[in-house]
Image (spheres, grey):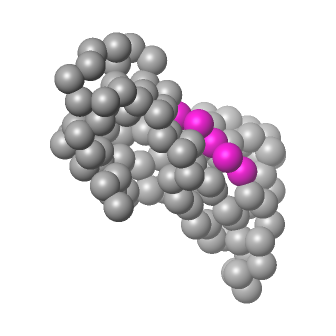
Amino acid sequence: SHRKRRHETFQPTSGQNPASRDYEFSGTLTNGSRWGLTEVIFLVTVKDSADKQLSARRLAYRWEDSALQPLSSDDFSVPVPGLDSVPKFEWSIVEARGYPPGRIP
């Protein structure tokens, strides 16, 4: 894969009421392609400790003022409301949007 991931976390939103059930999916994304990325769609699957799927969601992260440039890394954070808990999770990139080499948006 051209897009590498590392240091991903799934944590309760800080400063919120613990009963609110809001979480935040965050990490660092590395763009190993020649394209500038403007949006990434993640599929995040939450599982219980026995690997039973509890929830699966598509989450979008957009670079509003710029793009994730080729061969660079950037931190991302996506709010995920309405979860009871997150014992385990898996994620993947299911879609990416951007612009080809040599084109400035």
Magenta region, residue range: 57-61
Q: Which part of the image, by quadrant, shows the N terminus?
A: bottom left
Rendering quarter of residue 91:
bottom right
Q: Is residue 67 above or below residue 13?
A: above
Magenta segment includes 58: yes
Taking depth in this image into account, of 99 and 11 the one nearest to the observer is: 99
Coordinates of residue 74 in the picture (x, y in percent): 31, 38
Q: Identify the main secondary structure in magenta.
A: strand
Rendering quarter of residue 38:
top left
Coordinates of residue 55 in the picture (x, y in percent): 78, 60
The number of numbered badges drawn on the structure is 0
Q: Is residue 69 visible?
A: no
Coordinates of residue 14 in the picture (x, y in percent): 57, 39
Taking depth in this image into account, of 88 and 29 the one nearest to the observer is: 29
Q: Is residue 35 above or below residue 33?
A: above
Magenta segment includes 16: no
Q: Which residue is drawn at the image coordinates 77% and 52% (left, top)?
A: 83
Q: Is residue 60 above or below residue 8?
A: above
The residue at the far bottom in this view is 50
Q: Which residue is drawn at the image coordinates 71% and 71% (left, top)?
A: 47
Q: Is residue 11 left or right of residue 30?
A: right
Q: Which residue is drawn at the image coordinates 34% and 14% (left, top)?
A: 105
Q: Is residue 39 visible?
A: yes
Q: Is residue 92 above or below residue 67?
A: below
Q: Is residue 96 left or right of residue 16?
A: left
Q: Which residue is drawn at the image coordinates 26% and 45% (left, top)?
A: 33
Coordinates of residue 20 in the picture (x, y in percent): 79, 41
